[in-house]
Image (spheres, grey):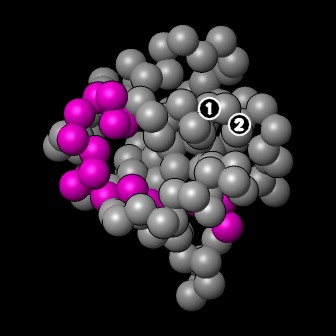
Amino acid sequence: MALQRNHGKPYTRNFSGCRSKRFEKRMFSGLSFLIEGKLCVSVAGMDRILVRLSPEDFQTSLEQNGVDTMQRNGKPLKGYIYVDNNILKNEKDLKRWVDMALAYNPIAKSSKQ
C-alpha cells in the first residue's frame, strides 16, 4: 500500500470509529494523528509510519521484519516503532497497526508539553 504523505484519507478512515478527541498535526516530517493529545500514528515520510504501542506490542512487533525502533538522540525510544511500507500491503494491514495504537492510547502517558 503506497503511503500518501500529503493525503491522509487511508489513515483517517481507520480512526473513524474513535469516539475520543482526535486531531491531525504536522509532526515528524509528516502527518500525525493524535487522540486525546497523545500520538497514535504518524505518516513518517513516504516509506513508513510511526506507531505508538504498549510495552507488550512493542516487544512483539520488533521481532517482525520491516519494524524498527524510533531513535531519539541515538537512543531507542521505547513504545515507538517505525513500520516500513513493504509490510503495509493493504488497508487491513494498516488497520491492524492503528488498532494496536488505539488500544494503548487510553492508558498511554501524555508527553510533556
* Closer-to-camera residue (59/75): 59
Three-letter code for the amino acid on which mark 1 is drawn: Leu
Please name the residue shown 64% across and 71% down the image.
Answer: 77
Look at the image and tell me whether residue 27 can be seen: no
Give x and y (percent) for residue 22. 61, 24
Query: Up-down: is 45 above or below 5?
Result: below
In space, the residues marked 1 and 2 are separated at their CA atoms by 5 Å
Label drawn at residue 102: 1
**Quadrant of image for the C terminus:** bottom right
Residue 42 position within the rendered picture, expressed as x and y whole percent measured from the top left = 46, 47
Q: x and y percent of residue 39 in the render?
A: 62, 44
Name of the residue lying farthest toward the left: 2
Q: Secondary structure at mark 2?
A: helix
Residue 95 higher or lower than 80, as above or below: above
**The disc label shown at residue 105, or none:** 2
Question: SS for tag 1?
Answer: helix
**Badge 1: how crowded within 10 Å, few (<14), some, or many (20+)?**
many
Residue displayed at 82% across by 48% down: 109
Which kind of residue does numbered mark 2 sit on? Asn
Q: Are marks 1 and 2 in contact (CB under 8 Å)?
A: yes
Identify which residue is drawn at 54% across, 76% down.
Answer: 71
Q: Is residue 65 left or right of residue 110?
A: left
User: Where the N terminus falls, by quadrant?
Assistant: top left
Question: Where does the magenta region start and end?
Answer: 78-94
Q: Does residue 85 show up magenta in the picture?
A: yes
